[in-house]
Amino acid sequence: MNHKIPCLDLKGQHQSIKKEIFEAFEKVYDQTAFSGGPFVEEFEKAFALFCGTNHAAGVNNGTTALHLAMLALGIGDGDEVIIPANTFIATAWGVTYSGAKPVFVDCTEDTWEIDPTKIEAAITSKTRAVAGVHLYGQPFDIEAVKKICTKHNLFLIEDAAQAQGARYHGKPVGGFGDLACFSFYPGKNLGACGEAGGVTTNNEAYYKHILSLRNHGSVVRYHHDEVGYNMRMGGLEGASLSIKLKHLPSWNARRQVIAQAYQQRIQNPKLKMQIQPEGHESIFHLFVVTTSDRDGLMKYLNDNNINPGLHYPIPCHLQKAYSDLGHKEGDFPNSEYLASHCLSLPMFAELTNAEVDYVIETLNKY
Ligand SMILES: *Cc1c(COP(=O)(O)O)cnc(C)c1O
């Protein structure tokens, strides 16, 4: 390869839809519909339909989506929410912002997602909810987690920030929990031209509460029924998302083709891939592998013009920000192993077949 293959490149995608996006931006501009408004509403309707849920509420980012999901469920000071130790830190932020305490559990050894068999031991009288993460775009074991939530009368939240369009036994994620939280950060499979996020739900009361919370605690203008926030989605973001949502199925399908090529044709016993249980249809936000000498593989790939990513090098429970929780190395061995042995291969829809072949050949020679 005479050029470096990045882990993610957003340029190709944005060049291919530039005309559509700019036309939409012009409409937003001419209507000065910059904050909330018709372009956000149009996207919310389309996204709810896409997820098969009754409602979708747009917000300013995915972390907000998690935060407001907690508040809509009445979670706050003194409560506990169970989340996987192996996730992007924002899952924990959502809990912390609400005033509740994140309680971590380990991931499984092979799916790398929340381990349902570890949840019950983490439940206390303060536990209110479990927030599972559809990590790297693959649905977690929703059925097993839901069963535990039902048994212990806990809310189920889906962190679907990495999983727009992923399916669990044929049904899109976003409607399995009480609420589901999405990020539309530019680097996600569905990313706005800007920062954005959203919450989906089938529960009208939660939905209406989020509409109020995101808008200064106000339903009727200048009447503030509770302390709220300014967490609306912008009009330009909404307009860009409506356009990109139309392309998302084909972009996700292309990622699945690339992932299948990786899964079938990378034949190197030094590498391990995420196990995909039957019916857990991933959209491959990331394609993560583990290997015993991660730094060695990292250097080898860089020397061969492939620029891998690292998601994520430190598990949540060992982050300095959560040192007050008193965790230590060894608490969640699977998450810790992953953090120190994982590496993300190039994964985005615009990778050419030649680039995919080259990544595969290079890894097979490692
Ligand atoms: C990206 C992400 C978030 C946060 O979304 P932002 O839009 O960046 O705030 C939350 N959870 C997970 C798992 C994510 O990957």
Image (spheres, grey):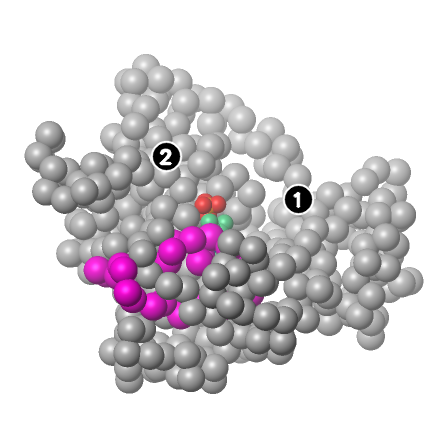
Q: How far across and down, in percent of the image, does residue 333 sit? A: 63, 76
Label 1 beta carbon within 8 A of ligand 1: no
Which residue corresponds to the image point at 41% horizontal and 64% vertical from the top-left? 102
The relative height of residue 277 versus residue 179 in the rendered view (above or below) is: below
Residue range corresponding to the magenta coloring = 73-96
Label 2 beta carbon within 8 A of ligand 1: no
Q: How far across and down, in percent of the image, does residue 360 sit? A: 81, 59
Spatial distance from mark 1 to mark 2, Cα to Cα? Answer: 23 Å
Determine the secondary structure under disc 2. helix
Residue 213: name its quadrant: top left
Please state which amino acid type lies under the numbered disc 1: Leu
Q: Looking at the figure, which quarter contains the N terminus?
A: top right
In the picture provided, is 328 more to the left or to the right than 179?
A: right
Dot 1 or dot 2: first in sequence order is 1
Determine the secondary structure under disc 1. loop
Is residue 331 in view? yes
Per the image, the residue denoted by label 1 is 8
Please tell me which residue lies in front, 207 or 336. Answer: 336
In the picture provided, is 102 more to the left or to the right than 15?
A: left
- What's the mark number on residue 238? 2
Count neighbours of disc 2 (C-alpha within 10 A) and say few if under 14, some if 14 to 19, many if 20 or more. Answer: many
Q: How far across and down, in percent of the image, does residue 321 sit? A: 51, 54
Residue 86 is inside the magenta segment: yes
In the picture provided, is 88 more to the left or to the right than 178?
A: right
- What's the mark number on residue 34? none
Q: Looking at the figure, which quarter contains the C terminus?
A: bottom right
Which residue corresponds to the image point at 51% horizontal and 24% vertical from the top-left? 19
